[in-house]
Amino acid sequence: MINTGKKLEEIISMLNNFRSEIGALSSLGLLNINKHAENFIKRILNLTFNLELDNLNDGKSNYPGLDLGDTYQSIAFQITATKTSEKIDETLKTCLKFKHYEVFSTIKVFILTSKQTSYTIKTNTEPHFLFSFAKNIIDFDDLFKIIEHLDPIKMNALFEYLKTELKQTVDALHGNNIELNECLLETVNTRDQLGLNNHCHWQANLKLISEKISVPEIYRRLNEFLPNVATKNMYLPTFDEILRKSHSRTEIAYESNPEGTHDENYYYGNALQIRESSISIERVNYTDREIFLNLLPEMISLITSILFFAKYAKGNFEIEITIQFESNTTLYFNPVRSLVHEQVFNTFILDSPFNLALSISDVHVETLTDLLQKIMDAFIAKGTSIISSNPFFEVKRDITEFVIGNIKSALDVQQ
């Protein structure tokens, strides 16, 4: 076990590396990097300051000029790589113009690079709210002073989060256009608590971008769409009130504790998050050996969520889908009882990590089968079969489309 002093050193090292990446990209004029950093920084600020910040850019919120906010504690942040006085003035003027101070009494600016030693701020925010460049403009150096005094549990949580998420975030900064989603499940931490070595993590995020549906409305309509326990268990099993961990007007989160299986030392956990016009699904498998998956629960939950948005959208619709899938060990695709039917002549393993981003505007069985084929493109043939030289997984379309058609009929989706 790494002691607290060593963990602090590694946390500082990782965050300084992240700051260096931001600085290098900023010097090239690539200032649209902020969107990749917001969710990453959100978790760090929440752990450091004991906040419950939400991303104010999710769902086209009405807080221009601000990125993260905790309405309960009335504090908000702008996250920026631009450290100038002019940038601070621009932020403060926007907050005054839109009266953000009526919701957030404290407004801070987090500089992703390094803040200036002094600022000349021309905007007078009083009497609406107080703003001091010495207290309200912060950077990583300010965080380090607070992280140093975190209790061991929070410091460990921060350490594990950085180990899990930093590399993906840096990859996104360097041109990966897939929007990375914050993970609900503490994969590495849970794996270590179970005393196991290996995991695989699936996350799918769906967002209806053609219109807005509030969290309470999604909740009500999901209960109409899946009207009884049997249908919930079959199509979206994490949507279970027993598993609900938190709820508010802007978010509902469901999470299961790790569940054992009939296989010794094999566990899995699930999570579901509902936000405005958005559903996120996670599933993690934990074991101490190689992993075999049929992806049946992952794909059924994905298809169900797509069909839900399609059924309740008003007219033409567009759904953005992002999928993240990774394993720290060899992960084999097991075709037994899979939603994806295939002609298997090879053994296929996950090319990890795998990211996919696309949008769909219909739920014809052909479209959904295309989506599943794109997911299966993550699996590469291990070795060469004497029967087939195809290096990639090939979905057997006729049977797969038949099964998807049955799911549509069962959920009363006509399109």
Image: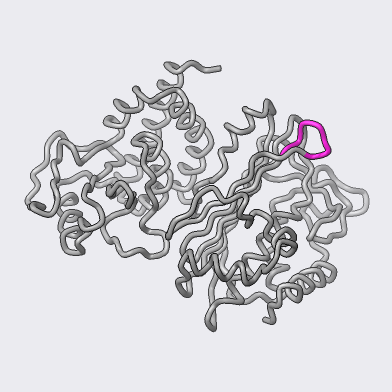
> On the image, which quarter does residue 396 sit in?
bottom right
Residue 324 visible in rendering: no
The magenta stretch spans which residues?
261-267
Q: Nearer the viewer, residue 225 or 88?
A: 225
Residue 50 pos. (x, y %): 37, 37
For residue 238, side relative to residue 209 (left or right)? right
Residue 262 lies within the magenta run? yes
In the image, is 322 to the left or to the right of 126? right
Residue at the location (24% across, 45% down)?
A: 109
By secondary structure, the bulk of the magenta-drawn segment is best described as loop
Front position in the image: 136 or 327: 136
Picture coordinates of residue 304 (x, y %)?
67, 65
264 vs 112: above or below: above
Residue 70 in the image, given as x and y percentages of width and height: 34, 49
Q: Residue at x 67, y 41 (%)?
A: 200
Q: Residue drawn at (74%, 29%), measured in percent from left and top?
A: 288
- The residue sitting at 47% across, 26% down in the picture is 153
**Which residue appears farthest toward the right when viewing the image?**
387
